[in-house]
Image (cartoon, rainbow, N blue to C red):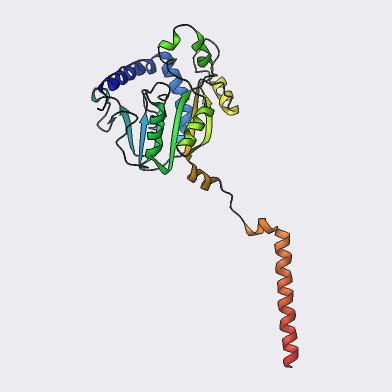
Amino acid sequence: MSNPQAMLTLAQLYREGRRYWSSADGIAHWKSERACLGPVCERLHGGHSLELGMAPSLIDMSPIRHSMRWAPSVELSEQPSTLVCEPDALPLPDESLHLVLVHHLLEVAPSPHRLLQEAARITADDGCLIILGWAPMGLSGLSRLYPGRRDRLPWRGSWRTPAKLRDWLAFVDFRIERVDYCGFHLPGRMPGNASLETLGRRHNVPLGDSYIIRARRSTKLAQIQRPRLRLGSALGGGALGHASSRVARRAQETTSKRTAEVE
């Protein structure tokens, strides 16, 4: 590794993250995120995907067959296909993956800008980049004000709004397609109230603990959103019909005139 000390620190953070995501609070948030992400992953197709994070897998619902996970060391890898490397130096070709998911890693990564650049670099032109982050305006975000909480996960690091990440994504030529919020709960409770979760997601209230950003390359998203020009709708159905009638009448009059001259 290019920086052994940095990788050692990242490995310690990874272990701490695993402990959090196996706790009751972590499992509750993971379930709410999985439920919100499920319909998105089920619609994605392609050859390969990569998940960068410390929680259990969230992209196993996707029909993409070849999925990879990331780990900072061999000891922490879960399967032979795990990508062991620095998260901001991924040994993968440009635009090689159809799905790249960054799960609550931008908050605590040593070089979040470089991590996002790498994630964007390896996302295929027709692929999807998904970012899950902690929402500063959610109840968990507000609870960071309690003394000592910012020293441990999940409250550690820098929590950024989707608007901030919109600027970051624009720098790597990506645009946000949609932002969804999840992890709704009452003060002092954990996510798990089905009615509250359904209500919050239905109206997409920006008060959930987590947000899910779907982003695509700007050129591809522009092609998807560009309206198709139809001749009938551009000229108007009536205008097109009247024009056709006038042309037909003129052709008929010309033909009749020539026939009379010949006779």
Q: Is residue 63 visible?
A: no
Count of numbered tags: 0
Q: Position of residue 52 (x, y in %)?
A: 36, 29
**Which quarter of the rendered picture does the C terminus lie within?**
bottom right
**Closer to us: 11 or 45:** 11
Q: Position of residue 21 (x, y in %)?
A: 38, 18
Is residue 64 found left or right of 36 in the rendered image?
left
Q: Is residue 116 visible?
A: yes
Q: Is residue 222 above or below residue 131?
A: below
**Closer to us: 141 or 63:** 141
* Residue that protrudes farthest toward the top in the picture: 147
Q: Is residue 105 above or below residue 173?
A: above
Q: Position of residue 209 (x, y in %)?
A: 51, 20
> Which residue lies at the image location 58% right of the left edge and 52% below the top edge?
228
**Closer to us: 176 or 46:** 176
Is residue 76 found left or right of 206 in the rendered image?
left
**Closer to us: 200 or 73:** 73
Q: Quadrant of residue 13?
A: top left
Is residue 68 found left or right of 135 in the rendered image?
left
> Which residue lies at the image location 28% right of the left edge and 22% below the top edge?
7
Q: Is residue 190 above or below residue 204?
A: above
> Which residue lies at the image location 38% right of the left edge and 30% below the top edge?
114
Is residue 257 found left or right of 121 in the rendered image?
right
> Which residue lies at the image location 49% right of the left edge and 14% below the top edge?
190
**Which quarter of the rendered picture does the N terminus lie within?**
top left
Q: Position of residue 110 (x, y in %)?
A: 37, 23
